[in-house]
């Protein structure tokens, strides 16, 4: 096992041994060092899982905290996310260095650039996918983590700009600049396969998702702007009531010139409902339900009058016509009984012009099945023996039995 692998295992074991402390730091936004957890915090600090914040308080490393946010889909306000433009430019530089190392026969450097390119393409794909998932979640719940319309409008505008930046990054990928660079030389074929599989094949789906999210955000922002004037008046009235708690609206008769909306208000329709949360009400409702007599359920079955079918008195006789393959089988048996040597079923069928439309495979299958079923003493094929000729399968381990022909003869 290599030294790098040992270091990774040691880091994971440290996280597992102090998992409760890591979870507390993530949930509570940090942990305070005391005599009991001092050794554990120092161990996590050595592995850069915890970093000092203020005095004796420590917080999770930002990269580890972002990883946990992605795992548990924790939504943070105004998350910026990755810079996809810089990631795309980095891929172009890695491809250029890979090509130069290939021309100069620096194999180790070429392999390192190929590995970095592979990881970079994977990070780009995961970044775009996670950003789209976050934006889709936000649009589905309509930014339910804010409390005011103004805040909701500002947040909506922020995420519209973020979606547009993501669309610009996808436009850079769609412009095929990186694709042209990767297809310019056959030496870049390994990088091209990675880029095509991880990014190019997913571009249509990503662009459709971005357009869908942008349409939802802009439509919702438009509705917010429509609601804003009414919401402003409601907030002003709420502020007035807060400053004047003893305010009572004037009586309608005292208004000399009532506003126009006063003549359109039809009043409140008051409806009474039982408070089932109260135990006394539930007991009373139970007594009322017990006092209600059970409804008598009676099922009336109505029988419809029948009618005579036309021509019911005359007995109809239906003559069943045998299928062509059944007639051919009977005639084949007659020929077998009159023949002195075994007769090939396939050759006999090909000699009969009337049965030229019968498929050879279907004919052999029907003949073999009928000979086995009707070969008893009472069957139509009684007194006839047969065997089939097997064809060598195309594969040595094939379990199929391929029948090429059937020979039948009269039992002596």
Image (cartoon, rainbow, N blue to C red):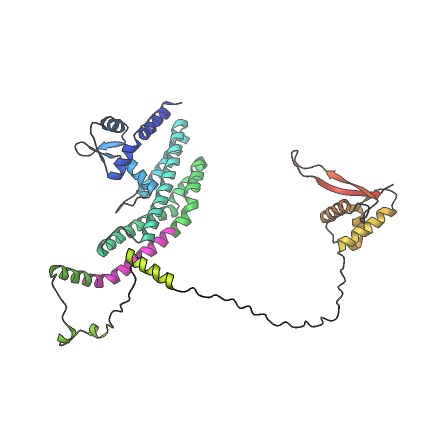
Taking the magenta stretch, the answer to whether it contains residue 230 is yes
The answer to which of 164 and 342 lies nearer the viewer is 342
Quadrant containing the N terminus in the rendered view = top left
Quadrant containing the C terminus in the rendered view = top right
- Residue 63 visible in the picture: no
- Decide: is 234 above or below 7: below
Magenta range is 209-232
Taking the magenta stretch, the answer to whether it contains residue 135 is no
Magenta segment, principal secondary structure?
Answer: helix
Task: List x then y, in percent, for residue 304.
Answer: 59, 71
Image-based side of 146 in relation to 382, left or right:
left
The answer to which of 246 and 176 lies nearer the viewer is 246
Q: Residue at x 40, y 27 (%)?
A: 108
- Residue 131 visible in the picture: yes
Task: List x then y, in percent, for residue 308.
Answer: 67, 72
Task: List x then y, in percent, for residue 99.
Answer: 40, 34
Q: Which quarter of the picture shows residue 275?
A: bottom left
Q: Which quarter of the picture shows residue 224?
A: bottom left
């Amino acid at each position: 096992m290599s030294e790098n692998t040992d270091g990774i295992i040691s880091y994971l074991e440290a996280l597992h041994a102090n998992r409760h402390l890591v979870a507390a730091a993530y949930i509570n936004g940090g942990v305070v060092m005391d005599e009991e957890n001092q050794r554990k915090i120092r161990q996590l600090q050595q592995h850069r899982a915890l970093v000092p914040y203020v005095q004796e308080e420590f917080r999770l490393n930002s990269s580890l905290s972002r990883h946990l946010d992605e795992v548990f889909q924790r939504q943070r306000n105004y998350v910026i996310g990755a810079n996809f433009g810089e990631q795309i430019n980095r891929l172009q530089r890695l491809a250029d260095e890979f090509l130069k190392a290939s021309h100069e026969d620096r194999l180790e450097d070429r392999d390192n650039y190929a590995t970095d390119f592979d990881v970079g393409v994977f990070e780009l794909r995961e970044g775009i996918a996670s950003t789209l998932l976050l934006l889709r979640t936000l649009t589905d719940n309509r930014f339910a983590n804010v409390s005011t319309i103004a805040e909701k409008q500002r947040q909506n505008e922020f995420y519209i700009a973020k979606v547009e930046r993501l669309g610009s990054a996808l436009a850079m990928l769609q412009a095929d600049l990186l694709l042209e660079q990767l297809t310019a030389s056959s030496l870049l074929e390994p990088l091209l396969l990675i880029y095509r599989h991880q990014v190019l094949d997913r571009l249509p789906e990503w662009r459709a998702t971005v357009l869908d999210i942008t349409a939802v955000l802009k439509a919702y922002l438009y509705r917010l702007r429509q609601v804003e004037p009414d919401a402003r008046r409601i907030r002003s009235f709420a502020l007035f009531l807060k400053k004047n708690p003893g305010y009572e609206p004037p009586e309608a008769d005292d208004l000399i010139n009532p506003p126009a909306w006063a003549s359109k208000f039809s009043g409140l329709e008051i409806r009474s409902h039982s408070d089932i949360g109260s135990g006394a009400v539930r007991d009373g409702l139970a007594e009322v339900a017990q006092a209600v007599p059970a409804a008598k359920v009676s099922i009336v079955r109505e029988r419809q009058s029948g009618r005579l079918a036309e021509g019911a008195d005359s007995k109809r006789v239906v003559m069943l016509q045998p299928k062509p393959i059944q007639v051919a089988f009977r005639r084949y048996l007659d020929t077998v009984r009159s023949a002195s040597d075994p007769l090939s079923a396939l050759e006999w069928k090909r000699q009969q012009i009337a049965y030229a439309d019968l498929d050879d495979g279907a004919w052999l299958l029907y003949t073999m099945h009928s000979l086995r079923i009707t070969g008893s003493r009472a069957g139509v094929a009684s007194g006839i023996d047969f065997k089939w000729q097997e064809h060598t399968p195309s594969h040595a381990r094939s379990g199929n039995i391929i029948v090429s022909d059937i020979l039948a003869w009269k039992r002596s």
